[in-house]
Image: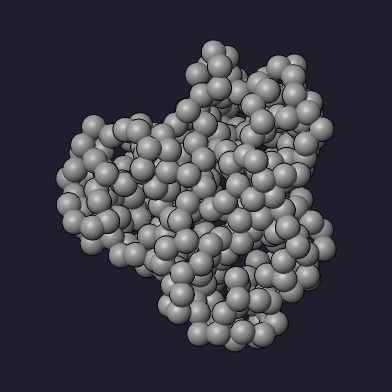
Amino acid sequence: MAYTTINKSSSFQNQVLYTGNSSTNAITGVGHQPDWTWIKRRDGGNGYSNFLFDAVRGVNKGISSNQTAAEITFNNGFDSFNSDGFTLGANTVNPSATELNYSGGNYVAWNWKANGAGSANTDGGINSTVSVNNTAGFSIVKYGTGTGSATTVGHGMNTTPNFIMIKPLGTVTTGGWIVGGDNIDNTWNNVLELNSTAAKASDPSFNNTAPTSSVFSVGNNNTNRSGENYIAYCFANVRGFSKMGIYTGNGSTNGNFIYTGFRPSFIMIKRITDGSEAWVMFDNKRANSFNGVTGILKPNLSEAETTQGAGPSMDFLSNGIKLTNTDGSFNNSGIEFIYMAFGQSLVGTNNIPNNAR
């Protein structure tokens, strides 16, 4: 059975497909004014990085999920967050326009709503700026400067985060992404790296301490280098809207069913038992049928969208996901995988049920 606390989830999370034009490009159809947008070119071969933008760091500040590079400024690149999407510029200088808005290029943008540019938070040992959407269980947290010794950071939510992704911004040095979650290790001793295929590994990035309803802990240089600034994206499970979970693959085209409690619109998956496979992302806008989801994009790689075989990789069903492919990045027999999933809206723009036919 499916449940919901948010009938129109597209008001808080949604994805759009668009075509680049190498000029001013107003992208609409998101369903809300996003505060975090993640863009990936789908075609054109390899070499087109994932780029992430948010309202807290500043609209034209980009970071890449497949790089350890410092934050960069997109002049005339990512120009604004708007009421129903965002606007891109021509951006004919470094970084290249081919990353966001190359003429004829096909792109996907995944979008989340927080609460604008954010406000000061002093709950932790390091002060932070937080943009919080408690309804959607999501907050954007910019904090710094790091102290180099174990401490805490306020996340602003009124509940405990279940999943956190952190990236240094390059004030002092470059560095990769650290990902912690209850589904990875409920003691928060083991972590993953978003920019890597590496398996989960013991690491003191979260000071071996689970978050609370007000703060998350940071320990070593990965999340708390002296003098460094960081961005963190925090997620909490919201019944009927979002779920961070874990499952075991069976290596069959008649794969396991993964219960989420909603019809998914987006899912990100990582094999955690070993380090042989990339992260993968699927969504309902790149589906090849009502249920079947085919297109694979990888947040830790710059490669173009791929598929595995003639059929879909999985089916998005009314209350979860049915695996239908044996690909090792999401369905190897006996291997554990973690996921972060978000649900489709139950109603559309006219408040008509989306499943109505």
- Residue 277 place in picture, x, y as percent: 62, 39
The quarter of the rendered structure image containing the N terminus is: top right
Q: How is the image coloured?
A: one colour
- At horizontal 66% and vertical 55% (from top left) the residue drawn is 192
Using the image, determine if residue 249 lies above or below residue 79: above
Q: Is residue 189 visible?
A: yes
Q: Is residue 338 visible?
A: no
- At horizontal 47% and vertical 28% (from top left) the residue drawn is 306
Left or right of 326 in this view: 145: left
- Residue 111 place in picture, x, y as percent: 47, 47
Quadrant of residue 246 within the rendered picture: top right
Using the image, determine if residue 330 lies above or below residue 115: above
Comparing 284 with 253, the one in front is 253
- Residue 88 place in picture, x, y as percent: 27, 50
Quadrant of residue 357 within the rendered picture: top right
Left or right of 132 in this view: 101: left
- At horizontal 35% and vertical 55% (from top left) the residue drawn is 81
- At horizontal 60% and vertical 86% (from top left) the residue drawn is 147
Tally the marks.
0
- Residue 139 place in picture, x, y as percent: 58, 62
Comparing 175 with 210, the one in front is 175
